[in-house]
Image (cartoon, rainbow, N blue to C red):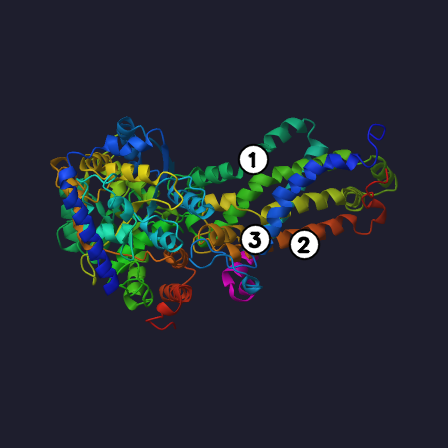
Amino acid sequence: MGAVLDRGTAPLLLVPSVILLLVILVGPFFYMVWTGFTDLHYALPGRDGSFVGFDNFRRLMQEDQIFWKSFLLTMKFVFWVVTIEFILGFALAMLLFHYIRQHRFILTLLLVPMMLAPVAVGLIWKLLLQGDLGMVTYYMRLIGIIDLRTAVMSNASLVMPAIMMIDVWQWTPFVTLVMLAGLLSLPKEPFEAAVMDGAGPVQVFRDVTLPLLRPIIALVMLLRGIDAFKEFDKVFILTGGGPGIATEMLSIYTFRINFKNWDLGYGAVSAFMVYLVVLIMCSIFYKAVYWNEGRAKPPKAGKS
Amino acid sequence: MKNGSLLGKARQSALLATALGVAALGSTDALAWSLEEAAAPYKGTTIRTVGEALPPLEAMDKLKSQFEERTGIKVVIEMYEHSEAVNKVMLDLNSKRGRYDFILQPHRELGRFVKSGHLESLEKYLNDTKLRDPSFKPEEQLYQGLWKEISWYEGKIYGFPFTALTMYMWYRDDLLNDPKEKSGFKAKYGYDLKPATNWKEYTDIAQWFTRPEKGFYGTAIQGKRHEALWYEWLNFLYSFGGDMLDTKSGSECGPVIVNSPEAVASLEYYKSLMAYSPADTLNYTWDDVMALMQQGKVYELIMWNDATYAVAEDRDASTVAGKMGFDLVPQGKGGKVGQVEGWTYLVPAYSKNKEAAYLFIQWMMEKSQQLNQHLNGGASARPDVYAHPDVQKISYSKASMDTNAVAKPKPTIPESPQITDILVRELSSYLSDAKGAQEALDTAAVEMSKLLGSCAPLKYPVQ
């Protein structure tokens, strides 16, 4: 490239991509932030987008109990699904790595739920858990987990665990896939050295496997964490946020403010909070990856 | 309709006088006016609309080719699920793109559309002798109260009813007349099995027919966190003598009374029906309970008239066609009640083909189109349609007319959809045991009062 284009011309090739990013990503983001400082409301006359300063932020932080309930519910959802998916996914990856030779075929089968659109997953499970005719409901009643008068999606205490279970069903294969790829990419020498030094399987796992996999672990948890925090489709299809506010996660609540009530100024602030949390999560995981590893920091651009 | 201010009354009278005057003046032109001539300047244009994918719109879709042949105006109809149809319109109106030349919307949206300047008043077209068919006399041909409630706002005409909706009681007439059921019921409850006229009877009958081991239930409530829940509960609220706001018409703001003792009693009663409903009843909307009835799995429901055809008449879709009975919602302290609801034809201010849209709407309001639409699952706002012998034969016609006669208006002010959203959330919280009935309605009342401002103080103090 350097032979064809000089240093002044090369950056020009990036201009279309940069413009595209500005138009579809950066521009709308700043517009959203600006909207958060206005009273824009599509449904109420007179709320035409006048500047209101930090009013929407203050209302969200100080007055909106439902927002905070949704926020806490979302954080609980993220914690449980990421933890369970990680443990199950890692265990499956170890199993495939150590004991199953034909793991490629099995992995392909395992990946099916992950390849389904979230809306399709929601619809499938809506049918499976349907209170009168659902197949899963039938077997749950058969083995006595629930009685004839109970339906999972209509029961405030069962519905959230059920949604978590569906998410685990869908996304554990993703964790397995990434962790297995990580395991396959590890060098053999540290393991051989550890065994020669007399380390047992548990010690090898704790002192060699886990430290070497740390960037992969952080990556997979970051990706799942962000995705789980934005969970919308399945919940919307399955419960719409109900019963009551039992499944009203932050994305559902933000959708409701924006596209049910059309309170776009306030809705922009709620959406901004989603962005802010994701940003904080990225920052935490980024630090986790490069924690105590100055040598592993990404190379600076332009030094090749 | 219960009238609003004196100014509103005066304005309405003037408008009606104008409309009648135009009709009278136009009587000599009645023979001269033709749809083909009126539509000639718009030949070749395409008009687009959007509405809810239900039998009335499907019937309109089948009828439109007749209009297209006569006028050369092409009609494109977009059909979506209820919420999607509303959202599409909201985005189009606010973007001012004018994608839709006329729209079909639930009347609760009327206030916010009018107040935001999104709608074109149709008075201009009604007064235009080139466009108005002299035989089209809405001031005589439509149910006046219904038309003014769902298509007028603050004394101005914005549209015409697409569907005159209301809810009433559905029940299984075949089971009601089964001798074994009749004798068994009488032995247990001490009175004859007949369509419920009050809520105690409704409960008794629901209890009698609840047989979970056979997959059959006395009733089913539309308990999902969805608009369906609010609409259904309103029947109980009105019947128990309660209301949401203390007003006389939908376009008025007034004190909040949704947490009255009557409202709390209605909600507690409503929840008690869960005992006779399928286990998944808190995940049901109108679609689900309609399917239950079609499959013959439930005895009685409170349901919509525009869904009745698919259950009572459509033998391809329903296992209980010809076996259904219909009657008014059982009576409580509030007496005979029903609710005014309807989708209405409206013309956006940003439409590029307003005249062509008006001509199509006017054509659809003609008796022959209304009759055809009604017989195929519609719900006409023309009394002469209900008087037609073919309509009289339909099993639900009487219940529909009786309910329309006692139907109460509901808010159409700009904040109405938000009021619905607040109430849906609180009703759902109560049904799922997250709150008590009083607490849920108090929360709703406080939020409604805050949303509406000084015009809507709390009439019942919050505990």
Nearer mark to the viewer, of 2 and 1: 2
Going by the image, does A96 lie left or right of A211?
A: left
- Which of disc 1 and disc 2 is earlier in sequence? 1
Amino acid at pointer 3: Ala
Q: Which residue: 83% across, 34% down?
A: A188
Q: Can residue A302 be seen in this view?
A: yes
Q: In this view, does B323 lie above or below B208?
A: above
Query: What whole-number distance in Å separates the C-alpha atoms at marks 2 and 1?
Result: 29 Å
Do callouts 2 and 1 point to residues on the same chain? yes
Residue occupied by mark 1: A113
Asked if labels 3 and 2 touch by Cβ distance under 8 angstroms, the answer is no
Image spot of residue B66 (x, y percent): 26, 28
Nearer mark to the viewer, of 2 and 3: 3
Image spot of residue B437 (x, y percent): 36, 63
Image spot of residue B105 (x, y percent): 34, 46
| The magenta segment | A58-72
Q: Does the magenta stretch include residue B87?
A: no
Residue occupied by mark 2: A280
- The quadrant the N terminus of chain B occupies is bottom left
Q: Main secondary structure of the magenta part?
A: helix
Mark 2: secondary structure: helix
Q: Which residue: 26% across, 34% down?
A: B38
- Chain identity of mark 3: A
Going by the image, does B17 lie left or right of A91?
A: left
The local crowd at label 1, few if under 14, some if 14 to 19, many if 20 or more residues have their Cα within 10 Å, is many
- Chain identity of mark 2: A
Residue occupied by mark 3: A271
- Which of disc 3 and disc 2 is earlier in sequence? 3
Amino acid at pointer 2: Ile
Query: What whole-number distance in Å separates the C-alpha atoms at marks 1 and 3?
Result: 28 Å
- Chain identity of mark 1: A
